[in-house]
């Protein structure tokens, strides 16, 4: 959300930019186009086909803010230091201004073209309703520390679409589009629904293909499927063929190992309790 489009004055902008929690608490970055003082600046340079960064050479990371030079121009397009809406990345949408929305569409941004954005009208924008982060810890604790913790469901599977192998292509190329999260390929729907309830209790890697009791379980965001899902009408029902061997995981083994570890913990707790009584 560019500051000029939101009407942020130069004086206010410079103070906020120099206090930016991202560049003060986060990391610099290297892209195929060079080194950058801020990983966000490097990403925006890639997105908007910028001039690139500094040469990657010993000591490039020792630069101070006074040395950032033209790279600071990327800050003008980033709302990270501004009092703007905050959104969990797992929400799947981005907050943008109207001009930025049009620019992203012109670039062919898949998210912008799919309407996965929230466009804020500068005329109605009220910065007093928001407050930027001031530290990395504040960022991690946002929203009641929703990113981590025993009761955080954001990092667990959110939904499972179930389909027989013969119907997989129809599911992916259907009028509703590609499902949002996980897909279970099984000819036994009742069995698949039981599997979804069970697997949904684990934190699993969306980049892997899981096999469980003869079923295939995969996430539509997996890197291995990106090219294939651009043409879902030609999708191969043998999902395993898209994944390298090290990305195919037997869930039975993983679940069994977890069960053994859990049983070992219970035994350990019982022994400790028994020892306390003996004392």
Image (tube, grey):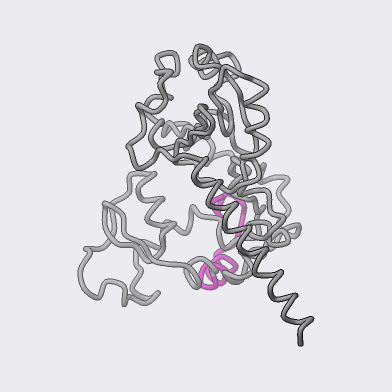
- Is 229 left, or right, of 30 in this rendering? right
Indicate whether 110 appears above or below 138.
above
- Percent position of residue 208, x then y: 44, 40
Q: Quadrant of residue 67?
A: bottom left
In magenta stretch: residue 18: yes
Indicate whether 127 appears above or below 248.
below
Q: Front-most of 14 and 220?
A: 220
- Is 264 left, or right, of 220 in this rendering? right
Look at the image and tell me in which quarter the C terminus lies.
bottom right
- Is 278 left, or right, of 104 in this rendering? right
Q: Residue furthest bottom?
A: 279
Q: Front-most of 236 and 262?
A: 262
Q: Number of numbered discs present?
A: 0
Q: Front-most of 243 and 148?
A: 243
- Percent position of residue 243, x then y: 36, 33
What span is colored magenta in the figure?
1-19
Indicate whether 58 appears above or below 143.
below
In magenta stretch: residue 259: no
Look at 39% across and 44% down and name the residue there. 47
Look at 69% across and 63% down and name the residue there. 131
- Percent position of residue 210, x then y: 48, 36
- Percent position of residue 247, x then y: 39, 40
Q: Quadrant of residue 40?
A: bottom left
Look at 67% across and 28% down and name the residue there. 193
Q: Quadrant of residue 213?
A: top right
Q: Residue furthest front?
A: 278
Look at 79% across and 81% down and name the residue there. 277
């Amino acid at each position: 959300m560019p500051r000029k489009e939101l009407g942020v004055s130069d004086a206010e902008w410079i103070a906020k930019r120099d206090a930016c929690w991202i560049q003060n608490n986060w990391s610099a970055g290297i892209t195929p186009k060079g080194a950058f003082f801020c990983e966000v600046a490097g990403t925006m340079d890639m997105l908007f086909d910028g001039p690139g960064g500094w040469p990657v050479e010993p000591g490039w990371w020792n630069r101070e803010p006074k040395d950032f030079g033209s790279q600071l121009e990327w800050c003008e397009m980033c709302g990270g230091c501004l009092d703007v809406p905050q959104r969990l990345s797992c929400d799947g949408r981005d907050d943008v201004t109207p001009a930025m929305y049009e620019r992203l569409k012109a670039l062919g941004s898949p998210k912008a073209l799919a309407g996965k954005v929230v466009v804020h009208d500068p005329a109605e924008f009220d910065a007093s309703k928001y407050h930027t982060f001031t530290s990395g810890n504040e960022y991690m604790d946002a929203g009641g520390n929703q990113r981590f913790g025993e009761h955080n469901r954001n990092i667990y599977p959110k939904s499972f679409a179930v389909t027989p192998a013969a119907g997989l292509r129809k599911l992916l190329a259907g009028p509703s589009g590609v499902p949002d999260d996980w897909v279970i390929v099984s000819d036994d729907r009742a069995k698949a629904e039981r599997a979804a309830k069970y697997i949904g209790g684990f934190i699993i890697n969306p980049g892997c293909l899981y096999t469980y009791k003869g079923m295939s379980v995969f996430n539509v965001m997996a890197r291995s499927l990106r090219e294939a899902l651009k043409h879902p009408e030609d999708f191969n029902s043998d999902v395993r063929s898209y994944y390298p061997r090290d990305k195919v995981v037997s869930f039975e083994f993983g679940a069994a190992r977890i069960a053994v570890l859990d049983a070992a913990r219970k035994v350990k707790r019982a022994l400790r309790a028994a020892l306390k009584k003996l004392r």
